[in-house]
Every structure is written in C-alpha cells, then in structure tokens.
Amino acid sequence: MFKAERIQRIKEIIFERKQIDVATLSSLLNVTEVTIRNDLEQLEKSGFLTRNHGGATLNASAFPEEQLHTDRMDGLNIPYDKEKEELGLVASQLVREREWIFLGPGTTSYYIAKALSKRQNLNIMTNNFYVANVFGSNASVQLLFLGGRMQNSGMYTIPEDLNRELEHIYLSKFFFSVDGASMEGGYTLTDMNVVDIIRAVSDRCHEAIICLDSKKFEQRSFIRLGDLTSISTIVTNNKIPQDYHQYYMEHGIRAYTSYNLKPLS
C-alpha cells in the first residue's frame, strides 16, 4: 500500500471510529507502529486528529457539525474531505446544462456529484455507487448507471464489455481522479480496473478532466496512466506545487483552481 493510500485509509478509519490506538492501526494496515506514528504526526499537523498516549482521536472541531453526519449517509461512510469538496465545486462549474458527462470511480466524483445535486437538466453516466446515491432522488437528472461486476473496495462496477457498452455513446466531459502525479512517473493509479475504465471512457468523450488535490502531487502509484501532458485539463487547488504550476503553463494545460474558473496564469 502506498503512503497516500495508507493516509487516506487511516483518515477513513479514524473518521468512522473517532479514536483508535497505534497497535490496532498497525495490525489493520500491516505496517510497523513506527510508520503509523509518523502518519499520525502528519495528520495531526494537518489538523485532522489529535495524538494521545498510544493512539489518536479525531479532531471533531475541525469539521462543520453537519459534515460529521451527512457525508456518511446511507451507510456509505465517506469521510469529509475539504480539498475534495473544493475540487467538486470547481469541477461542477465546468458542466453545462443538458450535456452528457461521465463521473468515474472514487470519492472525488462523489463530491462533484454533491456540488451538482441541486442543478437541473443534467445528463450523467457513471459506474460509481456514491454518485448514483447522490442523484437517486433528483427527477430532473437523467442518470445512466453502468452495470456489471461490483468492486466492493471502490464501490463501483466493472462492465463485462465496457467498450461494447460505450460503442454508441458520445460524452462531452469525463471527470476522474488519479492516485499520484509526478514529473517522472506521470499520472498513476493503484487499481488496474480503474485504469481500463479511464482509457475506455476517454476514447468516447470530447474532453477528459483529471481532478486531483495537492496531496496527489509528488506521489507515484502502481500503474501508469500517462505522462502529465496526456490530459489537457485538470482541476486542482491553490496548493499546487510551483514547479507543476510552471509545467502546466509551459505545456498549455488548463489547470482550474478557483471558483471563477480562470486557469493558472
């Protein structure tokens, strides 16, 4: 398990349990207690938790009270993530009325869906159960859900023949996330199934858009999707490292970081 993935899993566990000890986390994630202590120190600096003797406690004061409940609706147990919420708000403003979009696997797409949930006249295709849950009661949204084998760990489906499912489909925009971005490794992910989905859907859309928060930069995961110039539009936040800021500018890549939708300049 890569560090970024482990940190996210620790956040999910602590958000759900509210407090936990180092030994339990070490056992759950199959890493040393020293590694867990270092991870907890990093999360304490970010304000997510407070360390105590032998463990850590969720810093509930860092979250709006409603977020401690509503982002776990229907048993989905999605921990609140401020950076992903910001990405969702930015990405949602790239969506025009009546165009067809695809929201890919992952919790970033859930936050995009939440930002779009009050909109009308939307056409959305997805294989993400989190997204389907958000739009399930919105009659003004046309939702097309791709069936197939369920990937429980990621709460998404894997169609038996995705290319055939998409054969007569043409999408305006495709929003998806990655697990890492680096100058040397490009965009990378941990799940081969997600890589296959991204490649298939990208072939059927006008514009593919990567959504990644600042924690994903300088991270490298298991499977390479493509280099940093393989996607011409990204949504990120204002904490993007300066060298990536410069790289995107030099290569003509649109990087949206604020709600006024002005690319980095």
Image (tube, helix red, strand yellow):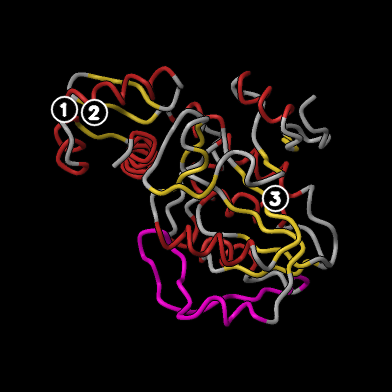
Side of 174 where 68 appears, left or right: left
Q: Nearer the viewer, mark 1 or mark 3?
A: 1
Q: Is residue 231 above or below residue 123?
A: above
Residue 88 sits in which quadrant? top right
- Numbered tag placed on residue 115 in the rendering: 3
| Spatial CA span between label 2 and label 3 | 33 Å
Q: Relative to the observer, which residue lies in front, 103 or 86?
A: 103
- Three-letter amino acid code of the residue under disc 3: Ala
In the image, residue 121 above or below residue 29: below
Mark 2 Cα shell of 10 Å, populated few (<14), some (14-19), many (≥20): many
Q: Which residue is mark 1?
A: 33
Label 1 close to label 2 by CB (< 8 Å): yes
Which tag is nearer the camera, tag 2 or tag 3?
Answer: 2
Q: Are marks 1 and 3 in contact (CB under 8 Å)?
A: no
Q: Residue at x 46, y 44 (%)?
A: 188
**Horizontal relation, residue 28 to residue 113: left or right:** left
Kind of residue at badge 2: Ile
Marks 2 and 3 close (CB-CB < 8 Å): no
The answer to whether 64 is drawn above or below residue 41 in the figure is below
> Closest to the observer: 43 or 118?
43
Can residue 92 be found in the magenta stretch? no
Q: Position of residue 102 (x, y in %)?
A: 66, 63
Name the quadrant of the N terminus.
top left
Q: Amino acid at mark 1?
A: Glu
Q: Earlier in the sequence, mark 1 or mark 3?
A: 1
Q: Secondary structure at mark 2?
A: helix
User: How many other residues sit within 10 Å of disc 3, few (<14), some (14-19) or many (≥20)?
Assistant: many
Residue 115: percent from left, percent from top? 70, 50
Residue identifier under label 2 = 36
Q: CA distance from mark 1 to mark 2?
A: 5 Å
**Residue at 67% over, 49% down:** 209
Secondary structure beneath dot 1 equals: helix
